[in-house]
């Protein structure tokens, strides 16, 4: 039975992390090392994780806690955990989500039967306040359709055009390919999954569907501000010109690369105009 490193990504997760950790302890697959990695949370997430680990010693192969003195963003938080990991597979999960009891067994069985294929499982969306999330559910459905495409080239081109993978559904990899990719790219603080999935597919892996809901994904009730949307767009644009553009050229998608370049140039002008407006408001306040 191969060792699986389950990495719990914690930031301001004090109210939800116990549910996440319990779902890992209750897995039917027994050979698991748990690594909680906290990105300098301002709440008591670390204390909650420490207390849980103390109370559950011996429940899994290993229980580890990795902390940081300053916030480094999601890729940096993952990479700190990977340095402590010794599993043949790695599963990432946010500290406000949780897994079905059979999740790790299903992921491992799929990978053992389908070499060089990254498993994508179905996701159950939930929230304490809402019960329906039609737009997100539509995105997840497109993700499942993408995972069922058998032709590697077609699937790779689809992922190059746009992100087709809902983060909680994937994020289960052979450790070897993560090492080959050099870990997660810390140039993108809030944007870890898409760059990694493209690198993995660039290495010759494809994606496949596990037709079961294995991950329970908590929908946040917080609104996305204009500034945070702009920050994400800026990060996506950086990724496009730094890496994705060149992947597309190498895959024979030159015209698509040109079209997306034009779109990002428009976004760049919008960002500059927005920053001028913000700067002008600040000058008026003074």
Image (cartoon, helix red, strand yellow):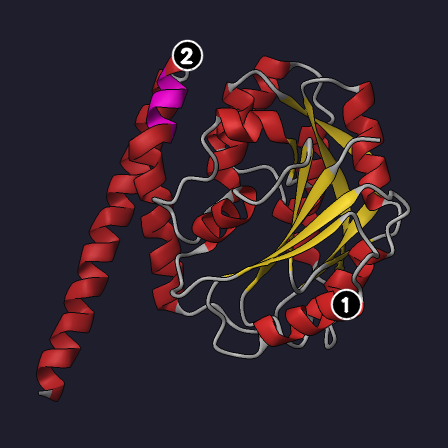
Residue 106 lies in quadrant: top right
From the top left corner, tell me how far across and down residue 65 is, in percent. Answer: 60, 59
Residue 66 lies within the magenta run: no
Foreground: 140 or 99?
A: 99
Vertical position of residue 233 compared to residue 202: above or below: below
SS category of the residue bearing label 1: helix
Residue 243 lies in quadrant: top left
From the top left corner, tell me how far across and down residue 36 is, in percent. Answer: 62, 58
Q: Quadrant of the N terminus?
A: top right
Nearer the camera: disc 1 or disc 2: 1
Of marks 1 and 2, which one's residue comes earlier in the chain?
1
Q: Main secondary structure of the magenta part?
A: helix
Vertical position of residue 35 compared to residue 122: above or below: below
Q: Residue at x 18, y 56 (%)?
A: 272
Q: Tell me the CA gap for discs 1 and 2.
A: 45 Å
Circle 1: is it few (<14), some (14-19), or many (20+) Cα within 10 Å?
some
* Residue 125 seen in this snapshot: yes
Q: Residue at x 19, y 60 (%)?
A: 273
Residue furthest out toward the bottom? 286
Which residue, given by chain and number where applicable, does mark 2 sit on?
252
SS category of the residue bearing label 2: loop
Q: Residue at x 50, y 39 (%)?
A: 194
Which residue, given by chain and number where applicable, does mark 1 sit on?
19
Residue 129 lies in quadrant: bottom right
Q: Quadrant of the C terminus?
A: bottom left
From the top left corner, tell me how far across and down residue 105 is, in percent. Answer: 85, 38
The image's mark for residue 278 is: none
* Residue 159 seen in this snapshot: no
Q: Residue at x 45, y 62 (%)?
A: 68
Circle 2: is it few (<14), some (14-19), or many (20+) Cα within 10 Å?
few
- Region rendered in magenta: 244-249
């Amino acid at each position: 039975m191969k060792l699986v490193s389950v990495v719990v990504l914690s930031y301001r997760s004090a109210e939800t992390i116990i549910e996440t950790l319990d779902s890992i302890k209750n897995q039917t697959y027994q050979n698991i090392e748990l690594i909680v990695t906290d990105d300098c949370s301002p709440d008591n997430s670390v204390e909650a994780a420490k207390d849980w680990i103390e109370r559950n010693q011996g429940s899994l192969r290993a229980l580890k806690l990795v902390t940081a003195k300053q916030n480094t963003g999601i890729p940096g938080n993952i990479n700190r955990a990977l340095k402590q990991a010794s599993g043949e597979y790695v599963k990432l999960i946010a500290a406000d989500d949780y897994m079905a009891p059979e999740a790790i067994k299903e992921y491992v069985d799929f990978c053992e039967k389908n070499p060089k294929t990254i498993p994508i499982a179905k996701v159950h969306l939930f929230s304490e306040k809402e019960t329906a999330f039609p737009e997100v559910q539509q995105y997840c459905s497109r993700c499942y359709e993408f995972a069922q495409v058998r032709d590697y080239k077609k699937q790779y081109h689809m992922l190059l055009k746009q992100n087709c993978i809902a983060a909680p559904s994937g994020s289960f990899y052979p450790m070897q390919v993560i090492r080959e990719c050099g870990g997660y790219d810390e140039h993108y603080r809030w944007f870890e999954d898409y760059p990694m999935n493209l690198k993995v597919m660039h290495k010759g892996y494809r994606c496949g569907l596990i037709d079961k809901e294995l991950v329970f994904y908590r929908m946040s009730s917080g609104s996305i501000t204009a500034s945070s949307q702009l920050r994400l767009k800026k990060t996506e644009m950086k990724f496009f010109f730094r890496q994705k553009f060149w992947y597309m050229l190498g895959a024979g998608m030159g015209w698509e690369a040109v079209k997306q370049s034009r779109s990002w140039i428009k976004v760049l002008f919008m960002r500059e105009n927005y920053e001028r407006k913000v700067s002008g408001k600040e000058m008026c306040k003074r």
